[in-house]
Amino acid sequence: MGSNSSRIGDLPKNEYLKKLSGTESVSENDPFWNQLLSFSFPAPTSSTELKLLEEATISVCRSLVENNPRTGNLGALIKVFLSRTKELKLSAECQNHIFIWQTHNALFIICCLLKVFISEMSEEELQLHFTYEEKSPGSYSSDSEDLLEELLCCLMQLITDIPLLDITYEISVEAISTMVVFLSYQLFHKEVLRQSISHKYLMRGPCLPYTSKLVKTLLYNFIRQEKPPPPGAHVFPQQSDGGGLLYGLASGVARLWTVFTLGGVGSKAATPPELSSPLANQSLLLLLVLANLTDAPDAPNPYRQAIMSFKNTQDSSPFPSSIPHTFQINFNSLYTALCEQQTSDQATLLLYTLLHQNSNIRTYMLARTDMENLVLPILEILYHVEERNSHHVYMALIILLILTEDDGFNRSIHEVILKNITWYSERVLTEISLGSLLILVVIRTIQYNMTRTRDKYLHTNCLAALANMSAQFRSLHQYAAQRIISYTCRHLRRYVYVLDKLYFPHSHCSTLQHCFSTLSDNGEELLSLTCSHILRSYASSLFSLLSKKHNKVLEQATQSLRGSLSSNDVPLPDYAQDLNVIEEVIRMMLEIINSCLTNSLHHNPNLVYALLYKRDLFEQFRTHPSFQDIMQNIDLVITFFSSRLLQAGAELSVERVLEIIKQGVVALPKDRLKKFPELKFKYVEEEQPEEFFIPYVWSLVYNSAVGLYWNPQDIQLFTMDSD
């Protein structure tokens, strides 16, 4: 059968593979390598074929694992590749297609072998396999060169120094993929790896000087979004003797590009969407993996340092001598690429990383006059929350929170007027400010979370972003103002309902009056009282009661619920668990409304209109012990403008009401509104953020890396989604 194998299933029988993994040592100068590195095997075209390829590679690898301690053939293959890379740059300049093709194939073989080795052995065992030489059985030289470190350095040099041409595109992608594979030990460990051999190599020694150059190259690969060469761009002559083996599986530079458009895992669809730039995708994934490596015991992660400190090419100020691994990059090009690529998780994660960690980038972006190009894709992610994974939604939301920490941003977004937002389907928005749209999307996200996912972290950050913006609300769209008030009212009604269920769980009494009449002064009997559903008209009486007995009643209710939980092993009812969450949401929404009324009342007649429309419900909460302080200003505004509307007579049109509100704003003495501390929230990463980010990044690699397949049953770092 030899090297003319036409099916992936035939690869374990291939004579060249059998020789590589067999018992015979092959010198690095043997002509065998030229035969091995030539091929005409068709490329896989589905994730099923990639899985078959993996399985075929495993059988070859296991044979190599068994025999390599005696043959040293893995080391010989590595040395063949290393010697070829020394001439790679010259070969690219001379358009030596065949040499580059064979060098790529050598790297492809190495990557396939390494991926299986890494999934089946420890780092120490892998390192040992790199030291075996052609000597007596199982011998190795302790003073020999470290081939593993040399290979990593060579890959970094290849990525950064080889010019990106049609004939070098595939080998550039393969070098990046091989680095990802080198770091993939993390996939097979539940705990975050804090010390490993690959980390050590990357953070010190001969690899360290390439840090800033590698980060810069990976960023530029992302920025440029270079597409692979067309399939017919370089057709290599097929070998008359069958050429070489398995690596027709990549089918040469001529057809290798098809590998890059494949899915990589068994749970994926058979025909996933094609990537426009495999090089950009793979570069971004490697960059995120490097940025999230844990610090060494004696040194910080240099790749994160590089990401934190790089500057704009237009910035002529000198780099501080205390900051290592610095470089410059074109911020305008980076900004454009980030705006265009936000449909992917990894691009959103990169944007978060840069905004959070690089103050130069953050300052530049906040100074842009076209922030809508960045904000709109983020809002669209949140708007389609049902279709996104929770991590992608978190990243998009935190990006908004970071942006809203800046008052200039909060002012400018209300000056940007948008036309016809087609993806917003609840209502036709022919014209709306970016700020009003942001409010609508964030409130929609909170509402979705409260009714579906019930994630406290999510709604807390949503409310924090709205709170940061509230003092700068300007000319709110009538629908945005309406949604702020209606969402608050929704929770006010829900709160009354939960109180009914919590304090009057058995519903035997017919009226509240009976409950109040049998209540002693200290409120202790309230826990055993029953009543029917609390009618809305009784809410103010209930809150008046609570204002006297709130703390004691709430404490007793909590103790009673906990007592039943411990004695009967019955979980707390949903409505009891909801109470604190609802109260927090109401409190924050009232503070947001109050902040707007206090700081920019004259800019927001639509908010006052919406507030007056729902004034009956707000008035019921003026005496609530948890809200009465924040209700003072809201109640004052309601009372003031209600009085002016009453004076104007009945049957007022919407236009007339808004006119009265605008006139009243001027007449309302500002000193009558009580001043509260400014609402400001700042995003701070949790302690040990790597516990979140490292599994997230590797899940992106697992699902998005091109031409790489890992057996889902072997993955330990994160839980696999069911098919």
Image: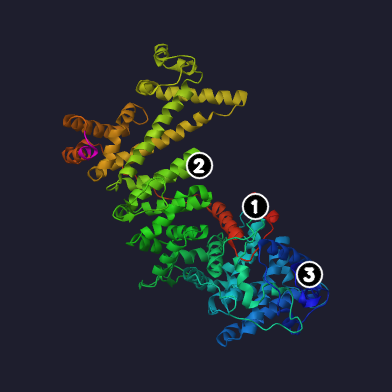
Give the residue type that dot 2 points to.
Answer: Asp
Instruction: Kindly state the secondary structure of the residue where label 2 is placed.
Output: loop
Name the residue rendered at 54%, 28% in the picture. 573
Span colored in magenta? 652-657
Give the residue type that dot 1 points to.
Answer: Lys
Q: CA distance from mark 2 to mark 1?
A: 24 Å
Q: CA distance from mark 1 to mark 3?
A: 35 Å
Report x, y in % for residue 292: 54, 60
Dominant secondary-structure state across the stretch colored magenta:
helix
Front in this rendered view, residue 691 or 382:
382
Q: Which mark is residue 455?
A: 2
For disc 1, the marked residue is: 190
Horizontally, residue 689 falls left or right of residue 587, namely right
Mark closest to the chain's N terminus, 3 or 2: 3
For disc 3, the marked residue is: 10
User: Which image quadrant for residue 676?
Assistant: top left
Report x, y in % for residue 159: 56, 74
Report x, y in % for residue 720: 64, 51
Instruction: Kindly state the secondary structure of the residue where label 1 is placed.
Output: loop
